[in-house]
Amino acid sequence: MPHALVVDDDHDSAASLRELIAGEQFTVAVAHNLRDARRQIALQQPDILLLDLRLPDGNGMDLLADPKLVANSEVVLCTGHANLETSIQALRLGAADYLVKPVNLTQLQGVLSRIMKPAALQAEVQGLTANLDETGHFGHLWGRSPPMKRIYEQISRVAGTSVSVFITGESGTGKEVVAQTVHDLSRRRKRPFLAVNCGAISPNLIESEIFGHEKGSFTGAERQHQGFFERASGGTLFLDEITEMPLELQVKLLRVLETGRFMRVGSTTAIETDVRIVAATNRLPYQAVSSGKLREDLLYRLNIFPIALPPLRDRVADIPLLANHFLAAICEQEGAVRHFTPEAMASLVTYPWPGNVRELRNVVQRAFVMAQGEAIDETWLPGGHEAAAASAWGGLGGPELPAAPAPAPARLAEPVQDSDAPSITLPIGTSVAQAERALMLATLRHYNHHKERTAAVLGISLKTLYNRLKEYAAEGAAPPEHGTAAQD
């Protein structure tokens, strides 16, 4: 049977925890101070150590300061004095999780069910890191460039903990892939991973989809419905495009994160939840706060461990690896053999990729389809034979390529593509959100409402452009929708 050690100077609390843990088929020992805790560990190394912070002879984190003492034990803070700073400090020292008194039984059961020796997790991560140069990937992520190695280091540190992760980056950089990798390297890997795009669900339905609803709670609710929090119980819930979530629902999400409880729509009974939250956005977080798209208190609650993904143009060295990886997967699926010519690979490397890794994957798929033989040349690649590629892409119903490679978003102030394009002038004091709106609408008008070309020129995804236009339409600022069917 697994063994647990409870270190708590409150005798009643320790006795209560002992009974609860014993009910989960554990053997349990109790210590009321650091000296007794060290003696109990010497007698029998616990599989899990539930540790109070304030003890008569010191701070509970003093045990964490001796890695040899708890190297083979999963440490969980269990205290009535937890706050964000102490929790983060303990997690940095090696604690896997924390519980706040009075202990939530559902969360305690979840913690006990996920016991995994720290050494096992560390060995797995070390194996991935050691084989990185040979395999070219870390979990679901591909790349060997310094920016990606930094991302892998961050994932390695946070995956084994329970803290919330906040992923930022441009559209197409792989935020969901990072979230999946964090989940697969965590103690929650045997439980569900659910990905929710907050911008893809109707505002009228999103609360029901996330929290669930009771039968008869609204018109059309013919049965009880379990939301994402219930379906992801014990696992990870990935909330993509968190800034697209309605503000009134952000308040409820914050409450769930703070209390570990939620209610279905139409219910008055609170349900305990044990879910790890990973959130993501393609907006700049503090800009989203200033523009009223994200609550500041929710940002602070989610942003415990931020991960900022680099755009593909900032890790050019990874382009050949990614392109060959995507091509190999397609070849295996289609039962064919294809390879890039040196000229084609050079074309891929020099293109700025405004759509990032997602755009690269789509371009590789199209090039595979259009290749006449085993060799894929630069004809059907952006930056190759521009006129032929643009004509063929338009004929296939795909996006029209710009006349020249789209500039990186960080260089929007430089001239782009059309030297005769009109300019816009903004007064000092214009907010970033207002400047973005003015530039986006002016660019859309200049290209006769051709959305694909507008998105490419601005260096954003088509989905982001549609989301922004929908916002502007609600504010009465967007121009009327028109243009040919092929363009829209």
Image (cartoon, rainbow, N blue to C red):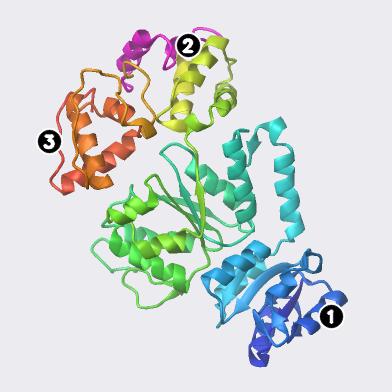
Residue 322 visible in the current orientation: no
Residue 29, image x, y percentages: 77, 82
Residue extending furthest toward the bottom: 12
Dividing the image into 4 quarters, which one contains the C terminus? top left
Q: Amino acid at mark 1?
A: Arg
For the residue carrying disc 1, how many other residues have a C-alpha within 10 Å: few (<14), some (14-19), or many (20+)?
A: few
Which disc, if any, is residue 328?
none
Q: Which residues are magenta?
A: 372-400
Left or right position of 380 against 104: left
Q: Rounded to the nearest whole Å, what is the CA distance between mark 1 and mark 2?
A: 69 Å
Which disc, if any, is residue 480?
3
Which disc, if any, is residue 378?
2
Q: Rounded to the nearest whole Å, what is the CA distance between mark 1 and mark 3?
A: 75 Å
Residue extending furthest toward the front: 428
Give the number of the mark in front: 1 or 3.
1
Q: Amino acid at mark 2?
A: Glu
Check disc 2 and report its element: helix, strand or loop.
helix
